[in-house]
Amino acid sequence: MDSRLEQFNNKMMKTIDTLKEEFVGIRAGRANPRLLDKIRVDYYGQPSPIQQVANVSVPEARVIQIQPWESRLIKDIEKAILASDLGVTPTNDGKVVRLVFPELTEERRKELVKDVKKRAENAKVAIRNIRRDANDHYKKMHKNSEISEDEFKHLEDEVQKLTDKFIGEIDKILDEKSKEILTV
């Protein structure tokens, strides 16, 4: 790949990575320990991810089990989960915190698919903005005689190919997530 295109390719890749990260946080009826990734618990004055202060497991399809290494953390973990936007009320037996995810209704699944589509569209807009920035950058280089007309046309074509590739990737990710959400 042309080194001049590398920075724009990297920006587009970051957009895809961000979208994937957002999609991980959207539950699709099954319990996924990654839903807890953004939740922090106060551990000796340090906000720490739950996975760093407890064992997290999925004993059943719709249950996440959190077993803290220190039992005093149970209340803090419950508080952190309640304060998050997870939408699940934790229960505990003194040793383990359990999150039981209710079955998603058809209506809720459709709402989630709409949300996922909106996020994918925002990612596409970000990709197109990167394309515009790249093309502006190359126009300026051409205007300043740093690159020839042929080089400019070639770079413009390459930027469009990159854009198409990443838009296609977004569509693929969106399809997978939509199917996952709609699967009962």
Image: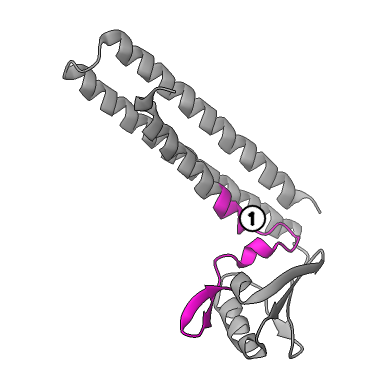
Residue 34 among magenta residues = yes
Is 123 covered by the magenta stretch?
no
Q: Residue at x 47, y 79 (%)?
A: 46
Whether residue 126 appears in this view of the structure is: yes
- Secondary structure found at label 1: helix
Residue at coordinates 67% horizontally, 59% vertically from top-left? 27
Q: Position of residue 10 (x, y in %)?
A: 43, 37
Question: Measured from the top left, where is residue 94 in percent x and y?
Answer: 74, 91
Q: Nearer the viewer, residue 67 or 169?
A: 67
Name which residue lies at 51% across and 82% down.
42
Position of residue 106 relative to residue 125, above or below, is: below
In the picture as drawn, the residue positioned furthest to the top comes out as: 150
Q: Which residue is mark 1?
A: 111
Residue 85 vertical position relative to residue 10 in the rendered view, above or below: below
- Rendering quarter of residue 179: top right
Q: Residues within 10 Å of mark 1 (few under 14, many from 20)?
A: few
The answer to whether residue 118 shows anywhere in this view is no
On the image, the x and y values in percent for residue 75 come to 62, 88
Expressed as whole percent of the image width and height from the top left, the position of residue 21 reads 56, 53
Amino acid at circle 1: Glu
From the viewer's perspective, is 45 left or right of 62? Answer: left
Q: Which residues are magenta?
A: 20-49
On the picture, is 162 further left or further right than 20? left
Please tell me which residue is depicted at 58% across the width and 34% down the height of the picture.
169
Q: In the picture provided, is 153 more to the left or to the right than 94?
A: left
Q: Quadrant of the C terminus?
A: bottom right
